Image (cartoon, helix red, strand yellow):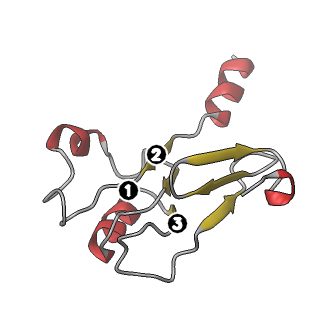
Amino acid sequence: RSRELLQHQLVMLVLVLGDLHIPHRASALPAKFKKLLVPGRIQHILCTGNLCTKETVDYLKTLASDVHVVRGDFEENTNYPEQKVVPLVSSGLEFVTDIRWFLGETRSHLHL
């Protein structure tokens, strides 16, 4: 029983998405996908850019309290960083636009 409890405590749901281009290329998230997005079920949202509007980011914040965004080429808000390190795992998780992911050490060993 304690092992099941420990496994339950270690599970986190992380949604990674990007290139939504709403409203420029799509009017909204696909209905079937949106139906899966239950507020409070997702612990972290990592956005890899091109969400485009504040309304899209505000919607994602209704799903999870921990939302991280990096800047894409078509953002209204140009204040988002180009890359970000998020401490979801002990060594950190770095993500940048164009779907480049790195576990472990930060940029010191990357050839960006």
Taking the view exactly as shown, the residue that stands out farthest to the front is: 111
**Residue 16: x and y, percent?**
47, 47
Q: Left or right of 80: which side holds 58? A: left
In the image, which is nearer the foreground, mark 3 or mark 2? 3
Relative placement, left or right, of 11 versus 106 is: left
Q: In 3D space, how far apart are the residues under numbered discs 3 and 2 (Cα atoms)?
A: 14 Å
Mark nearest the camera among 3 and 1 is 3
- In terms of sequence position, does the residue under pointer 1 or pointer 2 come before the other? 2
Q: Amino acid at mark 3?
A: Val
- Residue, x 58% and y 40% (percent of image)? 12
Tell me the number on the disc at residue 70: 3
What is the secondary structure assignment of the residue under circle 3?
Answer: loop
Q: Is residue 59 above or below residue 81?
A: above
- Secondary structure under the numbered disc 1 in the rendered image: helix
Please state the horizontal and vertical placement of residue 92, each as a whole percent of the image: 76, 51
Report how far apart the C-alphas of labels 1 and 2 lie in the structure.
10 Å
Q: Name the element at disc 2.
A: strand
Identify whether 75 is placed above or below 97: below
What residue is at 44 percent from the left and 62 percent from the top? 49
Q: Pointer 1: what residue?
A: 63
Residue type at mark 2 is Leu
Please, what is the three-letter code of the amino acid marked with disc 1?
Leu
In the foreground, 53 or 9: 53
Q: Give how far apart the Cα atoms at labels 3 and 1 are.
A: 18 Å
Contact check, label 1 and label 2, Cβ < 8 Å? yes
- The mark nearer the N terminus, 3 or 2, is 2
Question: Pointer 2: what residue?
Answer: 15
Q: Residue at x 52, y 40 (%)?
A: 13
Whichever of labels 3 and 1 marks the residue nearer the N terminus, that label is 1
Q: Quadrant of residue 27?
A: bottom left
